[in-house]
Amino acid sequence: MLYKKFKDKIEVYDKSQFEPQHILECGQVFCFEKTDRGYVVFPSENFAEITEKDDCYQISTSNPDFFETYFDLKTDYTAIKDRLSSTKILKEPIKFGYGIRILKQDLFETLISFIISANNNIGRIKLILGRLRKHFSSSVLPPFPTFKQLSSCSVDFFKSIGCGYRSQYLYNVLRQTSPQQLEQWQRLDTDQLRKNLIALSGVGPKVADCVLLFGYGRKDVFPVDTWINQMYNKFYSPLSSREKIRNNLVSQFGSFSGYAQQYLFYYQRSFLKQ
């Protein structure tokens, strides 16, 4: 993909492979806001503003190296889309979400965010995560709390910011693992890593697959939620088991499963529900 990195910005010239709305609103991330100028993103302790120019998207930031990696700018999505477009059910979703890129997110932030996301909607998830950030910082766009900060929180605190029944899960998981352990698990194969994640409090199969895809960068997983379940039972032989649906889709798409999931999920949720 054609882009250029400067000291204080990145200019992305290939708009067919980079569309901020598709990237940020396809359900993979919650640390962003839409503005009159475009979007602001604030993963971990970083910040960038994305605005559209005549010939490019401009990512203004003091840390262009971080956002080059975060937006996975070195990966050629044209080849990925060409490969997936040979599957009939993906032709329209790829046209619709042509600018999606799978972000490379912080493991700890991803785990906590997706535990909060369980049986929740994106607006409410962002609201809860915003309260969590603001509790520890008075900055306009506060950084994501550290493991030490979150470990000091009680179940009642998590309930007070709207986490509901997930409050106990968060309290427990902060005593079951750590950012260091999550990093150590990177060396495991996907199946074993998935088992380790599901053993954590508040992490079911779908949340585990989201952490695998958006945190660990494992593309051989296929998170199955309501939207993917509906898609599968429309285009394939109906199944009631989401685990069987997941396994069948991973068997079909292999190492491209994560990409296929994002195009299908974004299309189902954003276009077909209209």
Image (spheres, rainbow, N blue to C red):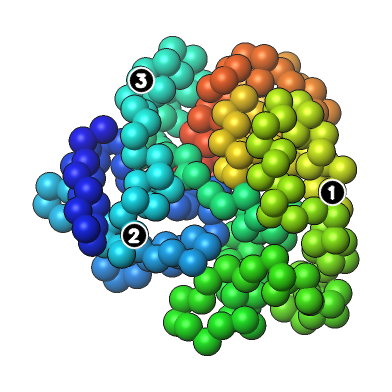
Evaluate if marks 2 and 1 touch, with contact meaning CB atoms under 8 Å apart: no
Q: Which residue is drawn at 40% across and 66% down?
A: 47
Mark 2 vs 1, N-terminal side: 2
Amino acid type indicated by mark 2: Asn
* Foreground pick, 136 / 265: 136
Q: Can residue 126 be seen in this view?
A: yes
Q: Position of residue 204 (x, y in %)?
A: 81, 44
Name the mark nearer the viewer: 2 or 1. 2
Can see residue 234?
Answer: no
State the residue at coordinates (46%, 76%): 141
Say few, some or many: other residues with alpha carbon within 10 Å of mark 1 (under 14 / 14 to 19 / 20 or more): some
Q: Mark 2 points at which residue?
A: 63
What is the three-letter code of the residue carrying label 3?
Ala
Circle 2: element type: loop
Crowding around mark 3 (Cα neighbors within 10 Å: few <14, some 14 to 19, many 20+) is: few
Residue at image mark 3: 79
| Mark 1 or 3, closer to the camera | 1
Q: Which residue is label 1 attached to?
A: 200
* Cα distance between the residues tagged 1 and 3: 36 Å
Measure the C-alpha gap from mark 2 to mark 1.
Answer: 33 Å
Sequence-first tag of 1 and 3: 3
- Which comes sooner in the sequence, label 2 or label 3? 2
Quadrant position of residue 118 = bottom right
Residue kind at label 1, given as amino acid type: Leu
